């Protein structure tokens, strides 16, 4: 019981830390740094990786879709939701200057899309890696 109490306390602390740092972020790099900082709280020495982010973006994680299912294999291209057909602006920061500039939207879409792609909430490390990849994508 004590372990669960400590785990819950650490989870709440981590969530608050990430929320506080993320709320002040205004650039893609600051958003990535906020997720990276939250991930480091769980795994000291963590550093975001565009390579891991690329792998995550293009790989199935036990669900039917990948990120690329809607956002295309090239995140510099516009995508389309596979069910609704709704157009999606490019995910790559180089192709869409509005990407990763609004922390509330970033978190909203990670929350929604991770459920579809991973079947759970994404970790701070996964988010940091994906943002690193989309910052680096040309």
Image: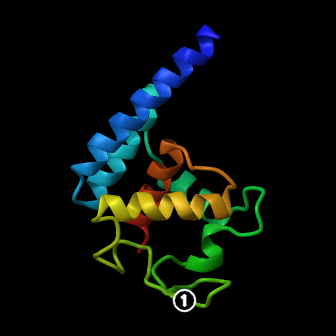
Q: Residue at x 54, y 89 (%)?
A: 86
Give the class, few, some or many, for how many residues have Cα within 10 Å of label 1's Cα (few <14, many ≥20).
few
Asked whether the viewer can see residue 83, the reply is yes
Between 22 and 61, the one lying in front of the other is 22
**Does residue 115 appear left or right of residue 17 in this picture?**
right
Q: Does 31 appear above or below 102? A: above
**Does residue 44 appear left or right of residue 51 in this picture?**
left
Q: Does 132 appear above or below 10? A: below
Q: Residue at x 36, y 80 (%)?
A: 95
Q: Residue at x 44, y 74 (%)?
A: 91
Between 68 and 18, the one lying in front of the other is 18
User: Circle 1 is placed at which residue position?
Assistant: 86
Q: Does 109 appear above or below 14? A: below
Q: Position of residue 46 (x, y in %)?
A: 46, 34
Q: Does 25 appear above or below 97? A: above
Q: Position of residue 128 (x, y in %)?
A: 44, 49
**Residue 60 position by quadrant:** bottom right
**Does residue 4 appear left or right of residue 63 in this picture?**
left
Q: Position of residue 120 (x, y in %)?
A: 65, 50
Of the 4 image quadrants, the one containing the N terminus is: top right
């Amino acid at each position: 019981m004590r372990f669960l109490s400590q785990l819950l306390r650490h989870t709440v602390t981590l969530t608050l830390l990430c929320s506080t740092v993320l709320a002040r972020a205004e650039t893609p790099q600051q958003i990535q740094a906020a997720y990276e900082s939250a991930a480091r709280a769980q795994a000291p020495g963590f550093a975001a990786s565009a390579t891991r982010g690329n792998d995550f973006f293009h790989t199935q994680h036990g669900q039917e879709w990948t990120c690329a299912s809607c956002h295309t294999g090239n995140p510099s291209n516009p995508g389309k939701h596979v069910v609704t057909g709704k157009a999606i602006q490019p995910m790559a920061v180089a192709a869409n200057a509005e990407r990763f500039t609004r922390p509330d939207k970033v978190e909203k879409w990670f929350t929604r899309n991770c459920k579809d792609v991973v079947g759970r909430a994404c970790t701070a490390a996964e988010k940091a890696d994906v943002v690193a990849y989309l910052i680096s994508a040309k």
